[in-house]
Every structure is written in structure tokens, then in C-alpha cells.
Image (cartoon, rainbow, N blue to C red):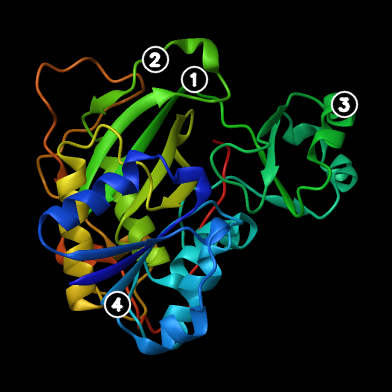
Amino acid sequence: MRLCFLVEEHYRHDGMPLDVVRQLTAWGHRVDVLRPGNSLMAISEAVRAGSHDAWVLKTVSGGPGLTLLEAAAAVGLTTVNDVRSIRGVRDKALAAVIARTRGLPVPVTYAAARWERLAEIPASEYPLVVKPADGSSGRAVRLVPTPDHLVGLGPLLAGEGLLIAQPYVPNSGTDLKVYCVDGELYATERCSPLHPGQGVRERQVPLPTEVARIAGQVGEVFGLDLYGVDVLLGPDGPVVVDVNDFPSFRQVPDAVARVSRAVLRLARTGTAVSAPAGVSAASAVSVPTGVSAVAAVPVPSVSSVPEPVRLPAQGAGVGVGGAGFVTGGMGGTI
């Protein structure tokens, strides 16, 4: 197969996806790597030629790569993930609306084009987590304890475009990251970027039943095949605070080979299985029996690598070219 990887400058030395590119090449496939932020390309001719079996995107949220991916999708070429799903995931304001409408546990979200307008949020909603609606890699994420703190932190957000603000979810300082690769879910825990002093060691952990159900719903709602979900275990249960298309897949066993095989499958099939029309996110995905729940993070240490949770067939989502509906993604308090 012939594949085109769009890799932003931010990821030009990153093992994911460059190790995937090397793996696919070693398997005998041709992989062209284009760096949209530092390349000249006759994009109209390259896209019109349709010489690639699939286009794969690994870029920052505001990078030019998504435009190129959309150009490929516009002429009917396969993209990984579906380009409309990616666009939605990276617009955190739009995503929060879609997520809450479809029953996903996402905090109430405020949006403002100017940071000064955030001062209108009721004091009862504090502390807040504020970040750009098109942010990625933790850029400009701020914990705002009180309205008075907003005055000092606000100027640091100037020029970031549309901002979103969400009430802070009380938690242990540990994030749960769930990765979906080819219909299998893997959970890892890591120190929250808002609580860097916790000293939590990043590692793979058992996947709580409720979190597995929610992660499967995310794939259904947003039409993603390869994705990551950041979850906090708050006082009222799991809360989704971010979704990423083509994340790092850190701590996933044999991640490079697994992601490489998933890319090939998606490139060949061109689509995945969608949820039946009219099925709500709350009921679209079930979790296999026998998956034990974990009450709180941190998860107790385990002596062996946890088995992944396998999503049922309908959990794959509509992830690659030709999906019949517009999808979105979500923001949150990473």
C-alpha cells in the first residue's frame, strides 16, 4: 500500500508516528511523510492524483495539516481518522456541546472570544480550568482558583482565540488515559499536569468497567477509530476531560505494531461500523462481562500487564472516509 503521513514540526522527532512509518516501511509498504509546516507541495495535484491509499494525520490542533487532510477527503480519499471527526475533536467548544447532548459526562463549558468575558462566570463555578478551544499538548491550560486570580492570569491567554472554561473536577491528582487501538481499550495512569507534584509513575493499569463503557461511547459519538480519552475519577464518578485523535499510545503493549496494523486495516476497508441510527450514546456501547471495576485512582499495583477490553463490533465508530454524519470532539480540564 502507499500511505501519506502528515506530520507537524512539533512531532518531527516523535516516536509516534515516526516509528509507525518505519514499521510500515519494513513491512514493504510505501510511506510518504509530508511536514505541512515546513514543506512546499503542489497539493491540488497530489490530492487530485489520488495516488495514496490513505492519508494519516499527526499534527497540533491549529496546524496546517488538517486543511491538507480535508482536501484529500473532499475528493473521496481515505483519511485516518475520518477528517470530520478530527475537526470536531479539535474544536473543544463545539465538542463539549455534542458530548453533553449525547450523554457523555463532560463538565459545563463556557466559551468566550476575550478572556475578560470570563469574569462573568459565577463565583460559585470556581475553581475553573481555562484553555484555548483549539489547544493541544497542554498549551495555555490554566487553573484559576478564584475570580481574583483571573485578572492576573487573563493576559496570559490574550491572543489564544476562543477560550473555554469549565469548573475544576476535584480529583486525586492522577489522570486516567484510555487508548483505543483497533477496537481494543488500554488504560494508563499518569500525573495530572495541573498537579505536577504528585509524582505518579506512568503505567498501564486495569480498566474500570464504567470508564470502559464511556470510552467506547466516545468512539461511537465522535466517529473515531484511533483515539485517546482523558478521564478524571471525580466525586460523582468518571468525567471526560479531553479526547485526542492519534495520541501517543504510551504504555500500550506493542503499540507501534498495533497502530500500524490498525492503519493498514482502515486504509483497506475505508470505513468502520457505525452505530445504528437513533441509538443514543448512553446505550450504543456495552462492556464485555467480567471486566472488574476500580473504585478510585491511583489503581493498586498489578504484577502483570492488564488485558485490554475488547469493544463489541458496533463500538468501532465511523472513523474513516465516507461517514454519513457530522461529528465533533470535546474539551475538558486536563
Real-space Cα separation, disc 3 to disc 1, in angstroms: 24 Å
Do the residues bearing badges 4 and 3 touch, measured as CB atoms within 8 Å? no
Q: Quadrant of residue 233?
A: top left
> Label 3 sits on what residue type?
Gly
Label placed on residue 220:
none
Question: Please, what is the three-letter code of the amino acid marked with disc 1?
Answer: Gly
Quadrant including the N terminus: bottom left
Specify the quadrant that holds the C terminus: top right
Nearest the eye: 282 or 26: 26
Return the disc, 4 or 1, that comes first in the chain's sequence.
Answer: 4
Label 2 or label 1, whichever comes before in sequence order: 1
Gap between marks 3 and 2 measured at Cα: 30 Å
Q: Residues within 10 Å of mark 2 (few under 14, many from 20)?
A: some
| Label 3 sits on residue | 152
Q: Quadrant of residue 216?
A: bottom left
Residue picked out by circle 2: 200
SS type, badge 3:
helix
- CA distance for labels 4 and 3: 50 Å
Q: Determine whether label 4 and label 1 are within 8 Å by CB.
A: no
Closer to the camera: disc 2 or disc 4?
4
Q: Residues within 10 Å of mark 1 (few under 14, many from 20)?
A: many
Pick the front one: 70 or 88? 70
User: Are the residues tagged 2 and 4 within 8 Å (C-beta)?
Assistant: no
Q: CA distance from mark 2 to mark 4?
A: 42 Å
Instruction: State the SS at label 1.
Output: loop
